Structure formats: C-alpha cells, structure tokens
Amino acid sequence: SVRDPVERFLSGWRQVQTFYELGWIARHWFKGGCKLAWTRDECTPNKQMRSNHAGETWRAPDASREEKLTIRRLLRFLSDVERCGLFDDHIYPMTKYFAGLARAGIDVRAATLIPTNDLDRALPAAAGVRAGAALGSAMVTGGSGWARTLGAVAADPAAPNHAIAREAI
C-alpha cells in the first residue's frame, strides 16, 4: 500500500511517540552528538500506558490542552528531524523502500499500489478474493486522522490552537 507523504510522516511520528510513551525508545537517542528534544517538557513517558492501567485511575485530559501539547510535540519533532535527519524507519519517505525494491530488480511500475486508507475496499479485488468473502480489516492510519485534525485546526481561525497548528503546517 502507499500513503500520502504527509500522512506517512505523521503516522510515523505518532508511532515513534507511542513507542516513547511505552518506554521502548533507546536512551542513546537523547544523548550524544544530536540529542532529540521532542520529548522535552510535558512529554514524559506515560506510566499508565506502560502498566496497562493496572491499579491506576485514568482521567480524560482537556481536549484543547491535549491538542496544543500534541502540536507542540510535533513542532519539536519536526525540529529534531531538521537537525538530526530521519532517525527512525517509521518516518522515512516511502521512496526509500521503492528504491530498495528497484535495487533488488523489482519494477515498482508493475506493482498495484493501493492507498492505505482504501485497503478495506480495494484489497479483496486486488487479492483475487470473491465478492462477499471475509478478508479482515486493514488499518486506517493514525497519520490520516492527524493530518485532517491539523489541517482543520489550522484552517479555523476560531480554534483555540489555530496559531500553533498554522505554525506546524
């Protein structure tokens, strides 16, 4: 499947952020020659997520505040990418993978490329599955949701986080 480049990046960022919250990011990312800073400030590892909410009470955060913190985190992440380069496979452009296929002698022009968010609709036909047969459900990317949210907030001058969303875009 293929993704819109912005959705791909935002989805990769959300994946890396989730790995950080789960405590799966190596500590050396935050030391050495190019220290990553996107986790600074309000972005401490989420103990509730890591412990699967065992014995802890979860309270829903204020949506506007959480949105602003998330956009601030994204801005720092973008700054980290500008300073340190693409430091995780989840945020590499898909062209890297297409180039790898080409080096292996696979002609990507002969491949059927399906947008990731269309997989549920298009995969049965592409896989040759008869109509009505169960095939499972494809993922709708977190990046597509974040791309829409960021765009909507940036386009709405009345949104509480309009200015910071425009800065991110």
Image: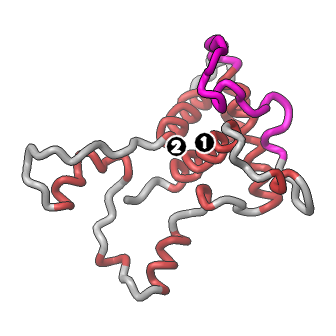
Magenta stretch: residue 38 in it? yes
Q: Is residue 61 above or below residue 138?
A: above
The quarter of the picture where the N terminus appears is bottom left
Real-space CA distance between mark 2 and mark 1, rounded to the nearest whole angstrom: 7 Å
**Which residue position is annotated with label 2?**
143
Q: Which mark is residue 161?
A: none
Q: Is residue 35 above or below residue 46?
A: below
Kindly indicate the quadrant of the structure image that contains residue 101. Answer: bottom left
Give the labeled residue for mark 1: 14
Image point 55% across, 46% down: which residue? 11
Q: What is the three-letter code of the residue carrying label 1? A: Arg
Residue 76: x and y, percent? 78, 43
Element type where label 1 sits in the image:
helix
Q: Amino acid at mark 2?
A: Gly
Which image quarter: residue 17?
top right
Q: How is the image coloured?
A: secondary structure
Drawn side of residue 37 relative to residue 2, left or right: right
Circle nearer the N terminus (2, 1): 1
Looking at the rendering, the stretch of residues picked out in magenta corresponds to: 37-65
Depth order, front residue of 6/152: 6
Helix, strand or loop under label 2: helix
Residue 167 position, x and y percent, is 72, 38
Horizontally, is 145 left or right of 160 in the view?
Answer: left
> Of 35 and 118, which appears nearest the observer?
35
Could you tell me which residue is drawn at 91 percent across and 63 percent down?
33
- Residue depth check, mark 2 versus mark 1: number of the one nearer the observer: 1
Tell me where residue 142 appears, x and y as whole percent: 50, 40
User: Most extreme residue toward the front, as rendered?
Assistant: 55
Residue drawn 58% across the image and 34% down it: 150
Near mark 2 (Cα within 10 A), the count class, few <14, some 14-19 or many ≥20, is: many
